[in-house]
Amino acid sequence: MKFVRSLGLLAMLALASGCASAAESEADRWNLTDLYATQADWDQDALRLEQQLQTLAKCSGHMAPSVKRFKACLDLNAEVLKRSIRLSAYASQTHDQDTGLTAGQDLKQRADVLNNRVEEGSSFFSPEILQMGRSRVDAFLRQDKSLAIYRHPLDDMLRMAPHTLERKGEALIAQFGMATAAAGAVYSTLADADMPWPKVKLSDGTEVVLDQTAYEQYRVLSNRADRKLVFDAFWAKWKEFERTFGVTFYEQLKRDAVYAKVRNYPDSLTQALDANKLPRSVYDTMVAQANANLPTLHRYFKLRAKMLGVSEMRYYDVYPPLVSSDLKYPIGLSTELMLAAVKPLGDDYVRAMAQGTRSRWMDVNPRPKKRSGAYMNGAVYDVHPYLLLNHTDDYESVSTLAHEWGHAMHSYLANKAQPFVTADYPTFTAEIASTTNEVLLLEHMLKVAKSDDERLLYLGSALENLRATFFRQAMFADFERDVHARVDKGESLTGEAITRIYGDILKRYHGDKEGVVRIDDLYTIEWAFIPHFYNRFYVFQYATSVSAGNMFATEILQGKPGARERYLNILRAGGSRYPYELVKEAGVDLATPAPYLALVARMNSIMDQIEAILEKRKHAS
């Protein structure tokens, strides 16, 4: 039996780079001694895990004789998983705070090997529990009330009976786990390490090597000719490897199709959704609503063109900020703003968050060789969440802080309310907590803004975030559904064919035919750049979550009776309920158009506010 707990590495937003201030305080670095005081302690705990795995093996074939034995095996498995998560967290975060240290790389590799051994060592649980059958499992649950904490995981396992193999089959699948990740590994190696990146000279004479980080940095330049130069050079390089990335992605699609067949599912999408008992209607409704509301996205692009002063929007005009600002938000001020913004969630929420910000749960500043981006790891049940940031004192850093602390408070509340076995939560609910915080932050920032320039900064940032989190992720989901369905039916796909499929979808979403945003054919190789496609049907949950988070935040801000508690109860529930049903019970049905229409309405409201400010300026000039 395996109670899956991810490490929660929810990488979000754009990459950040730079160096920490020489005056960086220890208070701005996370305290990993809360996990293990020394490397020797980690080694000792790893040895303990090895010993527990040997004991766990004795449960194989011997779980059903008595309720006492059954419970002992479940408890031991939970303890094994909890220990492996703690070991992995320490290893990965030691590595992430300085990716250049060989010791950190070695520790992470050791943890990866241990995790695979844990997966293999617990692979017999599902087949044996299914062999016991629901009636015997229910009888054990009635005999020993302490087994109640396992009720939902056991129910989840029993419902998967049609898709679970016998013990040898499950063990074989677990063993193949290390041998079936080649597509993603090849993509990562080529895209992150071996690509011969192009060099360009910008209009100011600066020469830039356009790797992925540089692309994200320079695609926002104010000089339009420079942006076009960056796009042309970067995507031309990916186009050179279209054939290779086509083979790599096609292998991933075939792998997913094979696993769906082995698990007796009709297709890859159905299997992916069934992991959390998500109705197919959630996915299809979200994509349908994104397409139905493309006029709102196109309105945004037209507004962007107006604010940038371009007569014809091109794809390289999508990323520059709508409003430039020299305002600075150091971590102390950012934290104050965030804590003020989340006050509608109640004193207990604010108090717990404030304590966490003072207790070295965060690694705040960018440093050479520190992992880029931002994430929250809340998987270590009996310690506390950890947050990796790369805070650069701009407003996006404030938004990222609020986003990641939404995740952290989700983990904090779930771990406090749930036993280990039901504390972890799926991605489907994870992003609700982060996006709710972002809505609360925007409303607070608009209240404290001292000028129209500030308001435009916050409104523009929120608008772009909604575009990227809803419409862009929906576009990716649209593409994934298409290519997976083709391979599920036995079609072959070349890199060139994948580019055509993606290009058609990219142009439709951006209104190329209508002249809203012109997309050069060269840029339709973008699919090869997206790493999320190697984690099947993952990104759609950003779009559903931001829609749900928008509805919850709106109701909380409006002071609707019970809205806050309904929302907080989702966070406290962790993984004790199926996520779609949990969110629906709280008042948001993601299989209906309502939450997506509410998000679109919010986008239009933000654009109304921006246009009112612009009109006001026009009359004042």
Image (cartoon, helix red, strand yellow):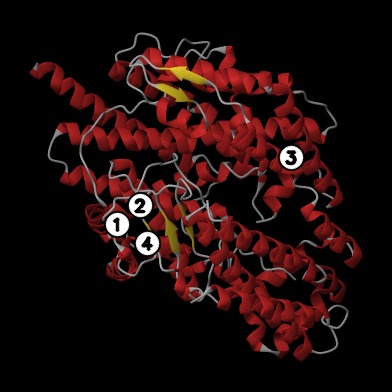
Secondary element at tag 4: loop
Pointer 1 residue:
24
Q: Quadrant of the N terminus?
A: bottom right
- The residue drawn where x is 39% and y is 12% is 225
How far apart in space, not on screen, are marks 2 and 1 (Cα)? 8 Å
- The residue drawn where x is 45% and y is 70% is 384
**Mark linked to residue 29:** 4
Pointer 2 residue:
365
Secondary element at tag 1: loop
Pointer 3 residue:
183
Question: Do the numbered discs 4 and 1 sit on residues whose CB atoms are within 8 Å?
Answer: yes
Secondary element at tag 3: helix
**Disc nearer the start of the sequence (2/1):** 1
Question: Do the numbered discs 2 and 1 sit on residues whose CB atoms are within 8 Å?
Answer: yes
**Mark linked to residue 58:** none
**Disc nearer the start of the sequence (4/1):** 1
Marks 3, 2: nearer the viewer: 2
Q: Residues within 10 Å of mark 3 (few under 14, many from 20)?
A: some
How far apart in space, not on screen, are marks 4 and 3 (Cα)? 35 Å
Q: Is residue 581 visible?
A: no
Spot the residue most to the front. Answer: 102
- The residue drawn where x is 71% and y is 83% is 141
Question: Do the numbered discs 3 and 2 sit on residues whose CB atoms are within 8 Å?
Answer: no
What's the residue type where badge 3 is placed?
Ala
Marks 2, 1: nearer the viewer: 1
Q: Residues within 10 Å of mark 4 (few under 14, many from 20)?
A: some
How far apart in space, not on screen, are marks 4 and 2 (Cα)? 8 Å
Q: Nearer the viewer, residue 495 or 490?
A: 495
What's the residue type where badge 4 is placed?
Arg
**Picture coordinates of residue 594, whole percent (x, y):** 47, 42
Compared across the picture, whether 464 is left or right of 109 comes to left
